[in-house]
Amino acid sequence: MIESILAWGADFIIALQQFTFWPWDGLLRFFTWLGGMGYLFTVPLVLWCIDRTLGLKLLLMVTLTMYLNTVVKEWFALPRPFEVDARIVSDGEMGFSFPSGHAQLVAVFWGMLAMHVGKRWFTGVCLAVIFLTGLSRSYLGVHYPTDVVVGWLFGGPTLWSWYLWGPALMSWPAQRKTIGLLVAVSLMTALALLLGSSAMVYGSLGMGLVAGLCSLKVQDNPAAMSLVKRGVRYGLGIAVMFALLAVLPKVAAWSQLPSAVDGFVLMAVFGAVIAGLLPWFFQRARL
């Protein structure tokens, strides 16, 4: 049964790859980038320049989704389509295939934005981004269509759970939120240890913990600032962020700690800079 579904998925990918011409190819590659590396630009944009509270919620949900997706991927350990079928053209990508992390993340991220904005036209844009990002993953030969659909299906309940319980959780007193966050991270760390998860899982936990702690005290109001100041914020913040991203792998290579500890600590540092230190600096610099 599973073999026949995967065989159908491979045929779907091969048929999809017949439609290869520059505007279409470039468009789908852009949506794959937007649903991956693009979060390094979109999450800070919201966090620093639009709405700090919304940005922290997005950061929390992205890290939670990364954790869930990676745990499930490592559990199933399904090879990617291009690794199984030589007919599939692909630039290649590391990791496992099922479910699609891009599809799961894009459903959560753009779904949350759509709920926050609450405009029909914007919801339509978000749905188009969600669909095209998923389609791009099969077009590029790195995911079966079933990977994409299941990624969407996993992202949907995550988003719906936030819609139901997120506002109540955010309204908890700071002490109760801190305790709840520590308990949740501890339980998810225990599960990761039990499953023998990779460093990426612990990295998502480190960043999620810091993002949650940063959400306890929200004072920044970027929406009240001029576009010039927001532009300066964004440009300076992105420069610092990518400098940090260049340094962290070197620290990891130098460190003698287990990879799980490195992943947790280094991503916690990254999250602290993005969600805590830079916003604090912007305020002190009157940006």
Image (spheres, rainbow, N blue to C red):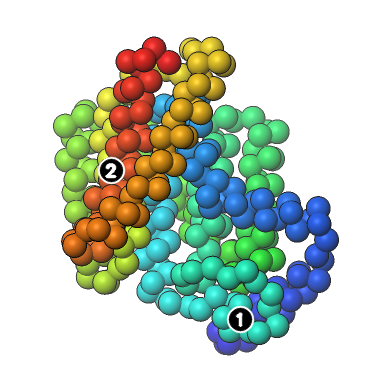
Specify the amino acid type for callout 1: Leu
Q: Quadrant of residue 271?
A: top left
Above or below — where is 8 with respect to 254? below
The answer to whether residue 163 is seen in the rendering is no
Instruction: Give the SS element for disc 1.
Output: helix
The answer to whether residue 134 is seen in the rendering is yes
Q: Quadrant of the C terminus?
A: top left
Q: Which mark, by number, is residue 240? A: none
Give the camera-side residue of 72 and 252. 252
Circles 2 and 1: CB distance less than 8 Å? no
Above or below — where is 41 with respect to 51? below
Q: Which mark, by number, is residue 269? A: 2
Instruction: Give the SS element for disc 2.
Output: helix
Residue at 48% in and 12% down: 224
Q: Give the mark, 2 or 1, whose residue is nearer the N terminus.
A: 1
- Residue 175: percent from the left, percent from the top? 16, 32
- Residue 142: percent from the left, percent from the top? 59, 69
Give the side of residue 100 with respect to residue 267, left or right. Answer: right
- Residue 58: percent from the left, percent from the top? 44, 39
Give the camera-side residue of 253 and 151. 253
Residue topped by disc 1: 6
